[in-house]
Image (cartoon, helix red, strand yellow):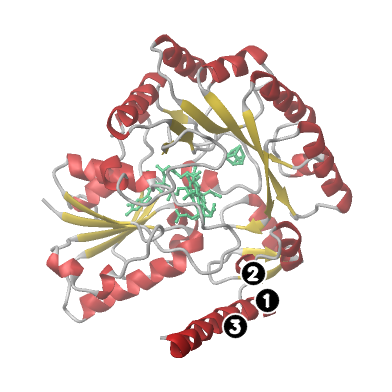
Amino acid sequence: MMNILMMTSAAPKTAPFSTDEKKPPLGLGFLMAMLKNAGHRVFFQDNYLRPSNVLDTDYLVKQQIDFVGIYSNTICYQSTLEYFRKMQKMREEGKWGGKIIVGGPHTSVGADTIPDYVDYVVIGEGEKSVLDIIEGKVQKRIVQGKKIQDMDSLPLPTWEEFIHLPYQWNDYRIDSCPIYNLNTSRGCPFSCIFCSVKAVWGKTYRYMSAKRVVNDIQHLQKYYGAKCINFREDHFTLNKKRTIEFCEILLRKNIRIAWMCETRVDQLDDFEYQNLMANAGCNLFYIGVESGSQRMLDFFKKGEKVEQFINAFDIAHKVGIKTHASFVVGAPPESEEDLKKTYQLIERIKPDYTSMNVYTGLPGSELYNYVKENGLYEFEDENHVLYLKGHNQRVDKFYGGALNRKIPGSLSQYFLVKEKTRNKYRRLFSKLRFG
Ligand code: B12
Ligand code: SF4
């Protein structure tokens, strides 16, 4: 039996993407369940939720930790690096003798950024590799994770590790709570050029059966009082047959649960289909519309037409499913005319919620390479994230000037730091005066 500490990495102070949403890391949940089922002792620290100082203490020694496994994504990679350094220092000083494993989306797009002293770097899916590593069956340092083909063979994620932690168990768009995330499919056959998800999961769509999904929901209802499920995955409804079966089981068994999912509009032109989902509890669709300009949609290789969005949103309004439309703004070669068309489409489809995302290049996508090769960026940060020319102006326009989303080190960020320092002194002075 081995003792294993699984951790996420802390969010940076400034990032071009929001780091406010705190949800259980289901990937680690699957890995921890596999390890527990194999008889190992598992410890968990979600530093993304609440940064901890375990690596500054004698925690690893006290708990006799044999392996530390870290979930890493590109935005949080600097904190991952800091953890590596601390553990390596402990090893060099002879204070701790365990091994370090790293996995998560960053390893799939940036394995070459990981220091040599990290013992194992798992690219892609980790379930099989993590067990093999811990059981001493792996000789190589860079491990290509085996794709799970039978998704029903996956264990339930370790909800018992998550349930008592202060995650966001509600959602501003839905009245029912608590709400739990599920991830029931992997891979995407589409080719959107701004998206790096394929680098992690590949193009083959694999999914849990409808029966398995319903079983997970019933488990969450029975043990954790689930009132709503958010299918946070790239495309919950891609397999229409599965979605229909899923809805039919919910209705047949009279399972009352609200749910929402991320989806595309390809098949949502079907009134009966959407109506079935609404009757089975579907409350909200989160749809990546990306642009109201067909020219931009074609450039993105979205494989969807403006008319399809109009049709799908019209039907959703009729059947009573709320909609959240997400748009990418500022990607090359977007013009004022394209942006105007986006606003016109928003007017036309009337989403209940709209998100405008200022395009920022994450490694691992076709558009990222295009931006890099054509020098279309103003700044490349330490994680190789690309900020396009005019990024800060777009942050002003679309994020109300949020300083922590601007280019690191820019003048505005200097003022952010100054503002923090000012607050610190303000607090100090108020203490001096009244303390
Ligand atoms: C749900 C979700 C969230 C949730 C939950 C995040 C989480 N940690 O699970 C929330 C809202 C919190 C979130 C926030 C963010 N997310 Co997010 N998110 C997703 C989404 C849609 C699904 C994640 C998921 O559940 N996957 C399923 C599980 C099974 O996969 P997994 O977590 O990757 O874990 C597997 C492997 O990576 C590996 N693995 C993971 N950790 C480890 C550790 C070890 C030791 C080993 C061996 C293996 C291993 O094994 C796991 C099982 O196979 C993905 C897209 C996607 N399809 O993956 C984006 C995604 C992960 N998010 C992304 C980003 C950018 C972010 C944010 C930085 C910004 C943002 N707001 O979007 C923050 C950072 C948060 C963080 N630290 O996790 C990017 C990451 C890209 C990158 N190169 O790093 C993705 C890939 C989407 C994209 N745009 O490309 N996200
Ligand atoms: S944006 Fe969605 S549909 Fe497009 S490639 Fe990425 S995961 Fe697939």
Viewer can see residue 116? no
Residues at marks 2 and 1 touching, judged by CB atoms closer than 8 Å: yes
**Percent x, y of residue 62:** 13, 67
Residues at marks 3 and 2 touching, judged by CB atoms closer than 8 Å: no
**Residue ID for mark 2:** 403
Rendered image quadrant of residue 305? top right
Residues at marks 1 and 3 touching, judged by CB atoms closer than 8 Å: no
Which residue is pictured at 66% across the width and 77% down the height?
A: 410
Which residue is pictured at 65% across the width and 49% down the height?
A: 194
Where disc 1 sits, the SS reads helix
**Residue ID for mark 3:** 418
How many residues crowd around disc 1 within 10 Å: few (fewer than 14), some, or many (20 or more)?
some
**Percent x, y of residue 1:** 10, 50
Q: CA distance from mark 2 to mark 1?
A: 6 Å
Name of the residue lying farthest toward the front: 434
Left or right placement of residue 180 versus residue 320 in this view: left
Left or right placement of residue 330 versus residue 239 in this view: right
Circle on res. 412: 1
